[in-house]
Amino acid sequence: MLRDLFRSFAAALRASTKASGRSMIVASAVGTAIYTGYGILWLYVTPVEYESFGLRSIGVLLCLAVCLSPRWPARARPLLPWVWFAAVLYALPFYSTYQLLGSNYSVLRSMLEVTMVFFVIVIFPHYLLALVNIGAGIALGVLAGWLTIPHFDTLNHAIVKSVHVQAMVYSVAAGLLFMRNNLKALLGQQRVETLQDLAGSIAHELRNPLGQLRYRLESISRNLPRPTADGRDVAMPVRELDAVYKELTQGKLAIDRGMQMIAMTLDEIHSKPPDTSNMRYLSAERTTRKAVDEFGYESPTHRLRVDLRVAEDFVFKGDETRYIFILFNLLKNALHYFGDHPRARVTITVGGQCVTFEDTGPGMTSDVLAHVFESFQTSGKADGTGLGLSFCKRTMLAFGGDIACESEPDQFTRFVLRFPVVAPADIAAHEARVLEQARMAFAGKRVLVVDDVAALRKTTRCMLEPLGVQVAEAENGQQALDVLSQGPFDAMVLDVSMPVLDGYATAESIRAGRIPGMARLPIVAYTAESPYVARAKLERVSVDALVHKQCSQVELVEALTRAYDHARRGEDTDLAAAGLAGKTILLVDDQEFNRRYLRLLLEERRIEVVEASDGAAALKMLELVAVDAIITDIHMPVLDGFGLARAVGASALSPKPVLIALSARDDQTALANARAAGIGALVSKPAEPGELLGALARQLAARPEAPLSPRETKPATPDAAAKELLNFNRLESLRRIGMIDEAVPEALQATRVLLGKLQDPVARRDLESARELLHSLIGICGDVGAHALHQKMRSTYALLIEHQQWPATGWHEEVLDLLVHTGRAIQERYLQQMEPTAGLQ
């Protein structure tokens, strides 16, 4: 109990010292002057009994030490709260009490004693600190008087009870009342000012990525061909097209930086500890170079004034994103002054287990330097948040290292990032673990390596085969498509630049469903192109992971793992979306753009959508339309998302629609408020398709079913049967790219063949063979838009894998019948000009 009490006291003292900040320095300076002045007066001008040069000197030294605390060495600064507490205790309650006793309770000393109590309470805006300081100081003063003052027992102690106690009680009460009222007003004003400063700072920080984005869009506009009035197709040179892709990547990076800045600000406000779950071994040279290359410079000349020097590369363990953001912060701060300091440069040096960041800008004074890593401390930038360097400090400490700063005004500012040494044995053990995990995950998997250079194919084969991977090869994209069509593969490592058919076109063909069952094949792209150009192009064709051609075995394995994870998330999204087809969702948001984006996302998955612009309009819509779920924004006019959720919960709707809220906040307070209002799930903005669809699927699966009321009954339409059988969005996309006439009949024929093959493992209860065939059937049926077949295969797969429940007798005939009906529906709507094929009969 005493230990807990001491910890609470120490925490309150640290908080009070941090809050008082500059006022503490001013008070100690005033204390130094007053103690010195009165010492001269009462020692030499008008001497007073029991006035002591030694005691006065101790008070002066304590006040002077606090006054000079900004110049203390870093290791001594944790002692400042205790030195400040001791200085106040000695200078006010202790010394006043000792002098009161020495003067035998004179009127002047009695007035000073009462005034002292009031001052201590004002200095420490915390009841516990103030009362302990006063009580301990008075007790020590009485003890000192008892030990050093002759005839102590003969002093006029009776006056204490008759006069001083009452005066002390009044002074304490008045001081506490004054402190409470003023502190409340000050905190309220401080809160308003802090929120205003924070809002302005965030707005300023967001201007940077938004300005970058505008600049990138303008660059794209300049690189696009001039429009023509006659509608003719206009050719675009490859160089200009690559420039467009580069600007697209830079624009996305600018948006990412803005989102990271918001997340960093919220983490600092909530004192959230850095997440260490994503830490891995990183090359200091490669990661630093990546940060320097990806930073959003305002002009090409700014980039030319940033030098990267590598004396010696080293490995450290950290989170790549957070480390890059440290360098982004340092670069942003340094480049802010480039306009006023045209000769300033930035030099980043890697070596000696350190990364040194030095700029020759305005520098910092010692006063600023003393608080440079504290939150909300900023200098020279009126609209900065003061959060960047505290983020850097907390992140480096989470890495097990530290960051230090030294500076000379008008000369330089130097930040040194120190990293703990990573033993070679630790790196070797990590790589062994990665490879062993890869061996367990990839053993027996079939991977197709596609590259026009035989030596590179051989190198990749040598990296993968020791992991138990079955490697096949192809020299170009067309050959790769031919190989894929002959048998299933689990992943592909694909070169980007190849003759006949390059990597981009190859990946696009696979994603478009040209090879039945392979649309979600995990693809890792090899490239030697600029990462800015390659990244945008590969995202365009949905490549899962990117790796440089000169990668190590561990880097290739990690890229394959990322590709598998990305592809699996895509499959999960597809599965979630398939279960949502035919559902009706109400979108509620006061921003039309947000509703339009979500409508497109949902309608692509055959989900019916209705809209409302606020909570009140949503309630009126619910009187007219039966919906399965509501996706609502939180902050809206008229009636917000919480009010809408409470109104739906109190309504007579049965079954009640599930509620999902979109919010920029996902902290514990926001989650608690959402649950209290009856919201089932909270999805962070901007909503990722997989996260939103997954939340919808989980919430709808958990909703209790109830019979439809007459108001909820949906009229049948002539196309109802076809809607159950087919995924029209998928079929339309195949028709638009000209693949429906070729791909659909082949896919349906392949489905019939695979169903025939499936009979044998089902009869033999061969789980592994049945799993592989069902996996292929799910992929083919989904790719070709055979919705009912896709759902049937999914449910069969789930029952078999999760519950070991094998298909019942007659399953084959049932599925073949469904295949025939699916083929007829596709024939009637899309293939009337074609002869019926075996897959459609």
Image (tube, grey):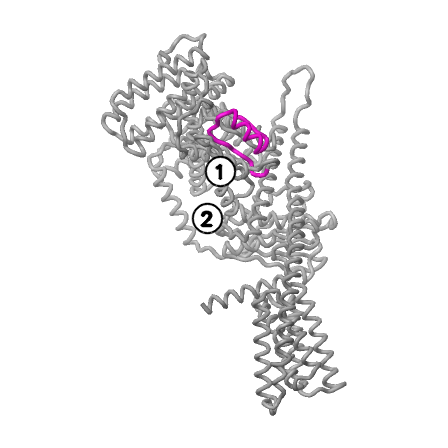
Screen quadrant of the C terminus:
top left
Q: Where residue 199 sits in the image (x, y, percent)?
A: 65, 46
Among the 4 quarters of the image, the one containing residue 186:
bottom right
The reply to whether the C-beta atoms of the residues labelled 2 and 1 are less than 8 Å apart is: no
The image shows residue 723, relative to residue 331, as above or below, that is above
Instruction: Determine if residue 454 is in view.
Output: no
Among the 4 quarters of the image, the one containing residue 73:
bottom right
Residue 525 vs residue 250, the one in the foreground: 250
How busy is the neighbourhood of tag 1: few (under 14 within 10 Å), some, or many (20 plus)? many
Residue depicted at x 30% and y 18%: 814
Q: Where residue 364 sits in the image (x, y, percent)?
A: 69, 58
Q: Is residue 648 left or right of residue 185?
A: left
Residue depicted at x 69% and y 16%: 229
Q: Where residue 264 sits in the image (x, y, percent)?
A: 57, 48
How busy is the neighbourhood of tag 2: few (under 14 within 10 Å), some, or many (20 plus)? few
Screen quadrant of the N terminus:
bottom left
Of the residues under marks 2 and 1, which one precedes in the sequence? 2
Circle on res. 392: none
> Callout 2: helix, strand or loop?
loop
Q: Amino acid at mark 2?
A: Ser
Residues at marks 2 and 1, CA–CA distance in whole angstroms? 22 Å
> Callout 1: helix, strand or loop?
strand
- Count the marks: how many? 2
The image shows residue 222, relative to residue 552, as above or below, that is above
Does the magenta portion include 625?
Answer: yes
Residue depicted at x 59% and y 59%: 404
Q: Please report the bounds of the magenta region as a residue range.
A: 610-635
Circle on res. 547: 1
Q: Which residue is mark 2?
A: 277
Instruction: Determine if residue 791 is in view.
Output: yes
